[in-house]
Every structure is written in C-alpha cells, then in structure tokens.
Amino acid sequence: MSEFAWDVEAVKEPEARQSDEQEVQERAEPAAEPETLAVSVDDFAAIEERILRAVTMVKRERQARIAAEERAAKAEAQLANRYPC
C-alpha cells in the first residue's frame, strides 16, 4: 500500500501542450483578415495637411537647432580666445 493518502491516478501530468514555437506562431498570425478602413476624401485631406504641417515644423526645428549649435560653438570659441587655459 502507498504511504500517500491521495489517489495516484488523480495526480497525472497535464496533457502535452503545444510547443512554445507553435504557440508563438499562432499568436503572431492574425485570426482573420482585418477590415479595410474607409476614409473619406475630406478626412484624407485633413490627415495629409497635418502631416505636411508636422514635416514643416520638423524642418524648422532642425534649422533652429543647427543655428543654436553654431551660435554655441562661436560663443565657446570666443570664450576660449578670451580666457586661454
């Protein structure tokens, strides 16, 4: 007789699970084809306008950063000339 009080048959390993690779692959695959998103011409034009404004803003900010870096380099050079080490 077994020294344990529980039934050995009740303590079985769970059924074999799918391999981790199969699980990951199933999660990566979409369950169904996504529906196409209908965008009106006005909505598309508004999105296009926002993108163009964002691009313009990025260009302007880059130019401002370049100008600031040039001013900083010039100021550092002037400071180095006034107070050489």
Image (cartoon, rainbow, N blue to C red):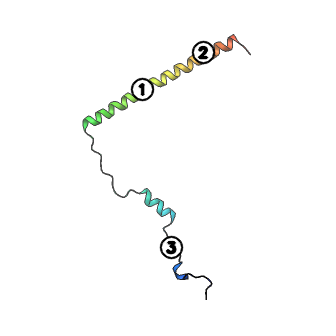
Tell me which residue sits at (68%, 14%) in the image.
Answer: 80
Q: Amino acid at mark 2?
A: Lys
**C-alpha span from label 3 to label 2:** 72 Å
Q: On residue 57, which mark appears?
A: 1
**C-alpha span from label 1 to label 2:** 26 Å
Dot 1 lies on which element? helix
Q: Quadrant of residue 49?
A: top left
Coordinates of residue 3 in the picture (x, y in percent): 63, 84
Tell me which residue sits at (50%, 62%) in the image.
Answer: 21
Q: Nearer the viewer, residue 38 or 12?
A: 12
Q: How crowded is the residue under tag 1: few (<14 C-alpha within 10 Å), some, or many (20+)?
A: few
Coordinates of residue 10 in the picture (x, y in percent): 51, 80
Coordinates of residue 40 in the picture (x, y in percent): 25, 39
Q: Earlier in the sequence, mark 1 or mark 2?
A: 1
Q: Quadrant of residue 58?
A: top left
Q: Which residue is mark 3?
A: 14
Q: Residue extending furthest bottom? A: 1
**C-alpha span from label 1 to label 3:** 59 Å
Dot 2 lies on which element? helix
State which mark lies toward you, 1 or 3: 3
Q: Which residue is mark 2?
A: 74
Relative to 49, does residue 37 appear above or below in the rendering? below
Q: Residue extending furthest right? A: 85
Dot 3 lies on which element? loop
Relative to 74, does residue 27 appear above or below in the rendering? below
Tell me which residue sits at (37%, 58%) in the image.
Answer: 31
Q: Amino acid at mark 1?
A: Met
Q: Earlier in the sequence, mark 1 or mark 3?
A: 3
Contact flag, marks 1 and 3 (Cβ < 8 Å): no
Q: Amino acid at mark 3?
A: Pro
